[in-house]
């Protein structure tokens, strides 16, 4: 209880002042949305002792549910292209991470499957006119994972090296990463992951640039035999994955303001996931139950993306306009093979001659989609900004073809320019609103790129009419004070569908249920001290997500009311520096978060809803920078840090496995 109160107090203390950023962050390389809610520089996350991006972002993104920070709840877009997930991309190869939740997400059309918003990732590229340079980052530490009365230990390792060089017209960058025991969220602490990344840029003239990028990330791991904390079964997991993607891009600016960007990207993921379970206690004659689940899945996707835009000014450059047209083509294929076998034996796997029960299933799907977006942005005298557009998606899957339209609108009014020009304390005061419509009934695999996984999946139910649209809207304000304090807040609503896995004999089914999501959120950051030797930056976000799910439409019985209340969630960041020392802290928490458990009964399916609480010290880093103390010829930069994750945790009714506690050190060097 004392730890709970102390950590809660540390979070609340950030409310007294709030890291400098403009009231409206700008992301110039983002073709889908240049006005995200927040932007995080990946440099801030490079020493996090873990390899999963979702865990690094806990508490940093206002509105992103901390219990469901991946999968269907958020869409990942990397350099303009939707990815099934971002764990195949090293944080050291990322430049910035932007987050947005609002009506402009309708610009993504049928790709907008996520009620939790969109994470836009811009990767690092080679820079022109730079000498040959080498950067090296390493993380070493000890993990401890406590489950019930058991405590597992492992050694965390991460090594990254990057070489880069650039001339006036040609630049290149190559990087390699090795991670061991770093997949904390999925409890794959036994995973070995290797990543290779290469980037080439060529600009023969100032108005043209072309480049190549490739990323290869294989992962493999065999877990020790362990007792699952939820089921009580002895369990062993084997996981193998090959993740590859490559892209080509061409940028041409023949006239001032006229820009055309073309990108081609190919993705391929091949994964094998095997699990072996043994009943904890056998029968009186020594017989135990053995079960194997073997899953092989593959995903391939080809994306072509073209963005043509023209920017121009009117009325002595007081009116700014930008018109753009985007064409997108996707061709996806996915396949999964699943087999299950159950045995009873007295002498282990060797004594299991023939299975008592077996099941083999295969799922294969493919789809082509074409998207066309027309978009117009206007800014009048820096007072009123407007954006409007519409997207048309058409896709074919088998013999079925459909077309969907997704309109979207945005309006922003600067009260600073309108009525507060003479108030020096107010740097910016923006009120805004957005609205968009889209279709959410595109096939599950078309968007996620993930095959149906798990035990005994039989079908996907839920056939929505083509006229059934989803909509989203947001209204809010952003304020900047004294050139150092930024405060933002908004209200958001989205009607969508939630996919629930329900037990139906002889296996399980996915059921799509109508749902309405609404939330309010407040986020703030500030530079408390910035012109003194001692520097202090702070950040805080608080939000509440409300969810209403129409369980009764699927004939599901309720135990407790899942719509009774919503979770309060929060995150805080504290950054201190003095002389060459630095201290960085990130914490996250949620209270009264709904968690669901489904059980089969004699009369149907019963959903049990409980409330979960979680308080976590997500990240801590104490470092020393040797700037000014190195010989330039030997080493250009060197930073050494003590790092930790999940040092303090308080949990109530949290059903998943607890996160690993990690303590280690990090070295960042440049040559």
Image (tube, grey):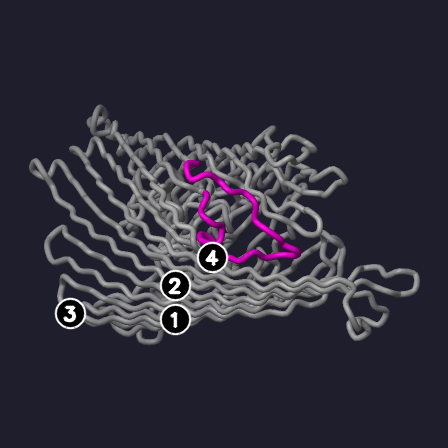
Tell me where residue 337 sits by quadrant.
bottom right
Q: Residue furthest right?
A: 284
The N terminus lies in quadrant = top right
**From what the image shows, is residue 547 above or below residue 273?**
above
Instruction: Looking at the picture, tell me which residue is in the foreground, 431 or 133.
Output: 431
Residue 165 located within the stretch drawn in magenta: no
Say left or right for 6 vs 602. Answer: left
Closer to the chain start, of discs 1 and 3, is 1
Q: Residues within 10 Å of mark 2 (few under 14, many from 20)?
A: many
Mark 1 and mark 2 residues within 8 Å of each other at the beta carbon: yes
Closer to the chain start, of discs 3 and 4, is 3
SS category of the residue bearing label 2: helix
Q: Bounds of the magenta span?
A: 441-469
Q: Which residue is tagged 2?
A: 93
Q: Position of residue 368 (x, y in %)?
A: 38, 56
Instruction: Looking at the picture, tell me which residue is in the foreground, 173 or 373.
Output: 373
Q: Which residue is tagged 4?
A: 449
**Which callout, 1 or 4, points to the residue nearer the camera?**
4
SS category of the residue bearing label 3: strand
**Which callout, 3 or 4, points to the residue nearer the camera?**
4
Q: Which residue is tagged 3?
A: 204
Q: Which residue is tagged 1?
A: 175
Q: Position of residue 437 (x, y in %)?
A: 37, 37
**Which callout, 1 or 3, points to the residue nearer the camera?**
3
Tell me how far mark 3 sits from mark 4, CA to CA. Answer: 37 Å
SS category of the residue bearing label 4: loop
Tell me how far mark 2 sits from mark 4, CA to CA. Answer: 23 Å
């Amino acid at each position: 209880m004392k730890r709970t109160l102390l950590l809660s107090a540390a979070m609340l203390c950030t409310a007294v002042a709030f890291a400098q950023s403009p009231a409206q962050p700008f992301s110039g390389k983002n073709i889908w949305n240049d006005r995200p809610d927040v932007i995080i520089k990946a440099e801030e996350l490079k020493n996090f002792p873990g390899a999963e991006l979702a865990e690094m972002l806990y508490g940093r993104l206002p509105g992103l549910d901390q219990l469901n920070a991946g999968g269907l709840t958020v869409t990942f877009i990397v350099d303009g292209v939707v990815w099934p997930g971002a764990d195949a991309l090293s944080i050291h190869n990322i430049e910035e991470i932007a987050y947005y939740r609002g009506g402009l997400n309708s610009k993504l059309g049928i790709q907008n499957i996520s009620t939790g918003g969109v994470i836009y990732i811009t990767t690092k590229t080679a820079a022109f006119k730079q000498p040959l340079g080498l950067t090296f980052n390493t993380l070493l530490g000890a993990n401890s994972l406590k489950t019930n009365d058991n405590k597992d230990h492992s050694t965390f390792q991460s090594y990254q090296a990057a070489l880069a060089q650039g001339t006036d017209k040609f630049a290149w960058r190559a990087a390699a990463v090795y991670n061991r025991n770093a997949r904390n969220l999925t409890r794959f602490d036994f995973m070995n992951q290797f990543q290779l990344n290469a980037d080439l840029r060529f600009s023969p003239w100032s108005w043209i640039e072309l480049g190549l990028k490739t990323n290869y990330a294989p992962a493999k791991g065999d877990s020790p035999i362990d007792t699952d904390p939820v089921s009580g079964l002895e369990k062993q997991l084997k996981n193998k994955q090959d993740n590859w993607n490559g892209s080509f891009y061409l940028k041409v600016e023949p006239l001032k303001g006229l820009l055309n960007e073309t990108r081609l990207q190919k993705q391929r993921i091949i994964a094998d996931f095997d699990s072996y379970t043994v009943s904890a206690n056998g029968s009186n004659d020594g017989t135990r139950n053995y079960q194997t689940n073997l899953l092989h899945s593959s995903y391939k996707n080809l994306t072509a993306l073209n963005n043509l835009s023209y920017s121009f000014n009117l009325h002595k450059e007081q009116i700014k306009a930008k018109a753009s047209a985007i064409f997108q083509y996707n061709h996806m294929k996915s396949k999964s093979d699943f087999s299950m076998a159950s045995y009873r034996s007295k002498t282990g796997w060797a004594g299991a001659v023939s299975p008592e029960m077996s099941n083999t299933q295969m799922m294969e799907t493919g789809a082509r989609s074409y998207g066309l977006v027309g978009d117009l942005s206007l800014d009048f005298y820096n007072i009123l900004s407007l954006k409007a557009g519409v997207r048309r998606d058409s896709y074919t899957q088998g013999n079925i073809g459909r077309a969907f339209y997704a309109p979207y609108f945005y309006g922003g009014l600067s009260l600073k320019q309108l009525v507060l020009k003479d108030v020096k304390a107010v740097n910016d005061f923006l009120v805004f609103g957005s609205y968009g419509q889209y279709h959410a009934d595109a096939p599950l695999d078309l968007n996620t790129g993930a095959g149906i996984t798990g035990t005994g999946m039989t079908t996907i139910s839920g056939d929505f009419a083509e006229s059934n649209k989803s909509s989203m809207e947001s209204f809010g304000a952003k304020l900047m004070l004294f050139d150092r304090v930024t405060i933002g807040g908004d209200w958001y609503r989205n009607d969508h569908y939630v996919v629930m896995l329900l037990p139906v004999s002889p296996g399980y089914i996915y059921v799509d249920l109508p749902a309405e999501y609404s939330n309010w959120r407040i986020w703030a950051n500030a530079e408390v001290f910035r012109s003194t030797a001692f520097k202090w930056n702070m950040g805080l976000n608080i939000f509440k997500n409300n969810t209403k799910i129409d369980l009764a439409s699927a004939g599901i019985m309720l135990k407790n009311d899942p719509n009774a209340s919503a979770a309060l969630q929060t995150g805080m960041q504290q950054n201190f520096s003095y002389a060459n020392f630095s201290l960085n802290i990130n914490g996250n928490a949620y209270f009264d978060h709904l968690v669901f458990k489904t059980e089969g009964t004699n009369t149907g399916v019963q959903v049990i809803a409980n409330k979960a609480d979680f308080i976590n010290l997500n990240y801590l880093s104490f470092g020393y920078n040797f700037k000014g103390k190195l010989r330039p010829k030997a080493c250009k930069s060197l930073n050494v840090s003590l790092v930790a994750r999940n040092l303090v945790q308080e949990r109530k009714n949290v059903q998943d496995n607890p996160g690993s506690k990690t303590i280690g050190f990090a070295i960042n060097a440049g040559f």
